[in-house]
Image: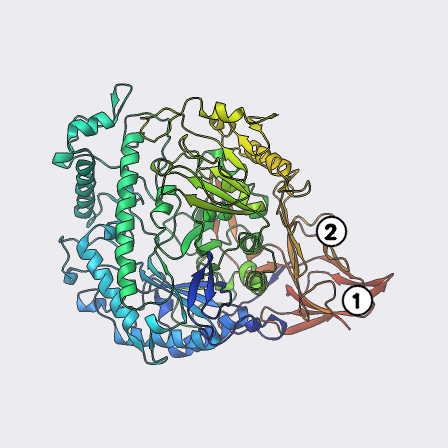
Amino acid sequence: MKQRIKIDKAKPNNGVLDFSKLLDAPAGKHGFTQVRDGNLYFTDGTRAKFIGFNLPTRSNTPDHQTAERLAERFASMGVNVIRLHAADAAPGPSGWSSSLDNPLIDYDSGSSRKFNEKGLDRFDYFIAKLKEKGIYVQIDLLVARVFQKGDDLDYADSPPFFFKGFTHVNERLIELQKEYATNLLCHVNPYTGLALIDDPVVMTIQVNNEDSIFRGTDDIKDEKGIIAYREELKRRFNRHLLAKYDTRKNLAKAWTYNNICALGEEEDPEAGTVRFPEGSFYQVTNDPMGEWAGNVSPARYADFMEFGIDVNRRYYNTMIDHIRSLGAKVPVNTSNLLNGTADVYSHIDGDIMENNTYFNHPMPPFHQETLVVPGMREYVTSNPLTVHKDGIFMRTEMLQMATTAVVAGKPFILSEWNEYGVNPFHSTAFISMAAYACLNDWDGLMVYCYHTSESWNDQPGDVITDIFDAYNDPSLICQFGFMASLFLGSLVRPAEHQMDLVFTQNDLKTLPSSFSMPNTFLPYITSLRNVFLDQGDTYTGDADVAITGGFVNNGDLSQAKHAVYFSWSSFRDAMRHASGTGRLERLVEQTDEELFGAKLGDRLLVFEDITSLAGDGDYTAFASNLDTALKRWGLLPSDRGLVGNALISDTGEISFDPIAGRFGIQTPGCSYFSGDPAGGITLTKDIVLDVNNDRLSAALLPLNCDHIDVAKSFLITLLGPTGMDETIFTSDGFTTIVDHQGKLYADTAEGSLFVQSQTATLTALDTVGTPVANIIGTPTDGGVVFNLDGTIPAVHFLLEFV
């Protein structure tokens, strides 16, 4: 039943909803974060895991009262990290801009090189208050800075902040970034007595946000301030080609295949006129067997990938060396929003890998009340194995997109993510991401974003005024304590097996549209990471299964325990200089079992024609064959992996059936269900729900011990669709127009809760944990039944066995 509720963004939780016990204040008491064995630890050896929020732009410089109230609110939610994001943004009247009166950077000075003293004081005080509560921070360096004429730039027009890829190339812009890093990180905070480089409250330092030379320029190439920098990038690419090939004649020869030359007659590297591939946002894809001519011909693409990797790595190493020279002691991250193999590889010089991923993200331009959402879906019924069937390669689930940037030997943090509340039932996304993060043994989750505000009392608790400000999204906030307990407490066990997705240097030089195909299955059942071969094409790792990246036909997995081979290209290199004909056929000779589109042996699975098998974006057959192999090899029992339509983790603790619309977690430390509750929800052997809701999420957390089978008290959260209760959804072809209207609501449970105990009590709690009603149970054979009629505006319940 729809019940209107309120969520105050600065009021701390109390009672059983106070999750501050998950924190260990003050932040830094265990020493600095360090990288050990591919994960984050503190100096004293304690495992370091982080869950929290992004605070962008003006929210970095709250007034002192707001800083105190937010720090207390965050701690009570179980938040132990805040990403201080885009503090370098230019001032504006509201939203995604810095405070007009208290920005961090003093743009009124005519440059972007000085701090505003009032803004810096607020920034310092906020960090000090977070530290007191046990909340760590990620410091971002370059995000939304708007370079000014007073910065002594190389070109008259400064580049707009929303495209920063040229900051990797232009030496003056790199100098300005170094200067900012020095001034910010070495400034002594008067409230802590420490500079950021010396303060263990800092969890990591990020060089920049969503930034790479591979990000497309086509949609903004004519923008004021872009042209001169774009021409500089083009000059550098042409110099790279000359350094590699020496003459236009040699370049034309290298770019020729079957008498077709990918180099246009008007293009000459000596004249600086050779074009580079351009996309719009992510690394553009490239068919390794595609047309040889054109702007993304395999030859042009391969050489630009090689060039881009060099540019990114040079830039990031320059910045990392500078940050280290200042005395920074914590791990350094390069950037995020990485979704192409060359892009990911070009960021591996950082200590930590990070990535951003969203579900149902609205299209720009953004409006507060009315949003346009492409292909809006329900999370619990969105099938990762078939999500690509509409031909949109970036139409992914959050887990599979995030996993593209997981690299062997590196901690991984999901630095931005959200399932925005445009679809009423979206609570599944938050807990499932936390569960799979545990399964894959990730190190951090930071939701975007809590709010874009500098004040604690300027946004309503009962209205969604901006979909990106998630402080009062009931599906997120009402489940956050459970999510924090699950992730920080590792209530879902890490996977029992390791899968390595192996890329050669030639693989990096192309990018098929189906490049994330293995990610649609493997991270849902086990641990998946990327491995890049720097020396030769032979994998020498120790994973249970090695899977060739398969963009070209050259990866050697002969030393792997078990190997999976396929290839999108029939050639051994991206430039088609060497044929791979017969290679997969020779591998097939080591197999003895015929599958649909593949051959299986005691240690090999070979897909002879991956293009035909996965051509329409349905990866079910691929997953089925891989599942068959894992079971033959003894890595999965019959009830794990792909079981019917369900994806079951190799630990047996996570189950996801997108066809039935059911997601579940069952571990000794917690129980969770989300989706279609038809047939009942068994939370424990003694606690069962029978409800009439079409959709419901049900979370159970023991309170007085670590095991649900012996606990005597529980926090139960029951949550259906949420949002604003008069919102209008209008379908317009592939898009959905969402008009937010009405007041904030949560759909409450309607049905009954059976507890196998004659002495159980059930208390309804409001959104911060204050009791609002005692629900009287009816004794029955073997227990008591509590009637849930949905009329109480509460989603949290305290169940106690007296």
- What is the count of numbered marks? 2
Amino acid found under the numbered disc labelled 2: Gly
Front disc: 1 or 2:
2
The local secondary structure at tag 2 comes to loop
Image quadrant containing the C terminus: bottom right
Q: Looking at the image, tell me whether mark 1 or mark 2 is earlier in sequence order.
A: 2
Q: Which residue is mark 2?
A: 680
Q: Is residue 608 visible?
A: no
The image shows residue 15, relative to residue 254, as above or below, that is below
Residue on which the image places disc 1: 777
Residue 322 in picture, x, y percent from top left: 26, 62
Q: Name the residue at the top extreme.
A: 259
Q: Choose top left, top right, bottom left or bottom right for residue 455.
A: bottom left
**Residue at 34% from the left image edge and 80% from the top image edge:** 193
Residue at horizontal 56 percent and vertical 46 percent from the top = 524
> Foreground residue, 324 or 201?
324
Point out the image quarter for the N terminus.
bottom right
**Extreme residue in the right direction:** 781
Q: Position of residue 117 (x, y in %)?
A: 26, 76
Judge by depth and name the residue closer to the eye, 61 or 32: 32
Above or below, comparing residue 405 to residue 578 in the picture: below
Tell me what residue is drawn at x 26 percent, y 53 percent.
Answer: 315
Mark 1: which secondary structure? Answer: strand
- In the image shown, does 798 or 404 lie closer to the viewer? 404
For the residues bearing labels 1 and 2, Cβ distance under 8 angstroms:
no
Q: Identify residue type, mark 1.
A: Gly
Q: Position of residue 601 (x, y in %)?
A: 59, 30
In this rendering, does residue 329 appear at all? yes
In the figure, is residue 31 to the left or right of 124? right
Question: For the residue carrying disc 2, how many other residues have a C-alpha within 10 Å: few (<14), some (14-19), or many (20+)?
Answer: some
Q: How is the image coloured?
A: rainbow
